[in-house]
Image: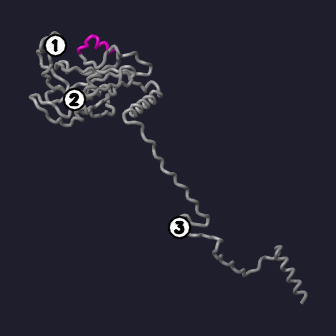
């Protein structure tokens, strides 16, 4: 498989050998690239082996362009193969809409496919409707209850979206199915500017919100009130009171056995009073 380094190289090969590719878009729809975009050439090969499950033999093919029956065996793409093809263009199904048609006694489904476009990576949408009757008719006459009509309506509507969006035909030859299904679109190039990386992230968030809705606001946990600090006379680890003046008796000061040194002002006053008392005697 050739790996293309530039869009011009791919377009040159396509113009010279268009039979090499199963193009999912018209090449003329590829617009000029903006300064901050890069081309993305996306390809997908189907499993064309008998047990692969991507294709099956189609017997109801009708006639060719010239009105003659097809000489070679024709194949149609199964649902498994269609789901592979939609990934080439980042295809994603949005939330389906279901309802019941009482007059037709049928279950209806409206499916919507979102996929990347060819012009600067714009997102495109395609919607299709499928109805499945709850009571189906037999080919040999009579009726029968259709099993899982809602599921069949959804899958049928989704398959119709893929076929319509990417121009998938009803049947192909084996040679045609061996070619890659190809999609070309523009994508932001974050290597050219840091702001492009931010824009690309925002674009991915927008696409996610389109699919799943906006996220709920984060519930902030209530802030815990700071506990008051323990007093300075309380051990913060054990909680025991180290020393306090409130309601606790303080130890009495030890008695002095030696008199203070003479000559201090307060001692001189005491000695003067003692002298006067002694002299009076």
Q: Quadrant of residue 162?
A: top left
Helix, strand or loop for disc 3 = loop
Against 89, residue 69 (above or below) is: above
Q: Which residue is mark 1?
A: 64
Residue 84, image x, y percentages? 25, 28
Q: Nearer the viewer, mark 3 or mark 1?
A: 1
CB-based contact (under 8 Å), mark 3 and mark 1: no
Which residue is pictured at 58% across the width and 60% down the height? 229
Between 38 and 149, the one nearer to me in the picture: 149
Q: Which mark is residue 238?
A: 3
Q: Which residue is mark 2?
A: 79
Ranked by sequence position, the earlier of labels 2 and 3 is 2
In the rendered structure, the answer to whether residue 33 lies left or right of residue 277 reads left
CB-based contact (under 8 Å), mark 2 and mark 3: no
Whether residue 135 appears in this view of the structure is yes
> Farthest residue in the top direction?
66
Q: Is residue 119 magenta?
A: no
**CA–CA distance between discs 2 and 1?**
24 Å
Ranked by sequence position, the earlier of labels 2 and 1 is 1
Q: Residues within 10 Å of mark 1 (few under 14, many from 20)?
A: few
> Farthest residue in the front direction?
103
Task: Name the dominant secondary structure of the magenta segment.
Answer: helix
In the rendered structure, the answer to whether residue 133 lies left or right of residue 248 reads left
The magenta segment: 8-19
Q: Which mark is residue 213?
A: none
Q: Quadrant of residue 76?
A: top left
**CA–CA distance between discs 3 and 1?**
95 Å
Residue 62, image x, y percentages? 14, 17
Q: Residues within 10 Å of mark 3 (few under 14, many from 20)?
A: few
Q: Residues within 10 Å of mark 2 (few under 14, many from 20)?
A: some
**CA–CA distance between discs 2 and 3?**
72 Å
Which residue is pictured at 28% across the width and 31% down the height? 109
């Amino acid at each position: 498989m050739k790996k293309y380094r530039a869009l011009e190289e791919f377009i040159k090969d396509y113009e010279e050998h268009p039979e090499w590719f199963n193009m999912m878009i018209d090449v003329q729809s590829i617009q000029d690239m903006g300064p901050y975009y890069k081309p993305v050439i996306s390809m997908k090969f189907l499993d064309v082996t008998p047990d692969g499950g991507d294709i099956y033999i189609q017997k109801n093919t009708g006639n060719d362009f010239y009105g003659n029956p097809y000489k070679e065996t024709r194949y149609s793409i199964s649902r498994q193969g269609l789901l592979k093809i939609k990934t080439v263009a980042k295809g994603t199904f949005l939330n389906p809409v279901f309802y019941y048609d009482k007059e037709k006694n049928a279950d209806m489904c409206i499916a919507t496919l979102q996929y990347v476009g060819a012009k600067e990576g714009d997102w495109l949408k395609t919607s299709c409707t499928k109805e499945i009757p709850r009571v189906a008719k037999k080919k040999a006459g009579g009726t029968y209850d259709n099993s899982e009509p809602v599921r069949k309506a959804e899958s049928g509507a989704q398959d119709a979206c893929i076929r319509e969006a990417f121009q998938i035909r009803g049947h192909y030859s084996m040679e045609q199915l061996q070619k890659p299904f190809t999609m070309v679109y523009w994508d932001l190039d974050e290597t050219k500017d840091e702001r492009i990386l931010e824009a690309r992230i925002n674009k991915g968030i927008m696409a996610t919100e389109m699919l799943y809705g906006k996220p709920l606001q984060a519930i902030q946990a209530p802030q815990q009130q700071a506990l008051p600090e323990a007093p300075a006379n309380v051990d913060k680890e054990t909680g025991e009171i180290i020393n306090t003046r409130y309601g606790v008796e303080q130890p009495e000061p030890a008695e002095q056995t030696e008199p203070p040194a003479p000559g201090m002002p307060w001692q001189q006053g005491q000695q003067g009073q003692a002298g006067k008392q002694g002299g009076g005697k």
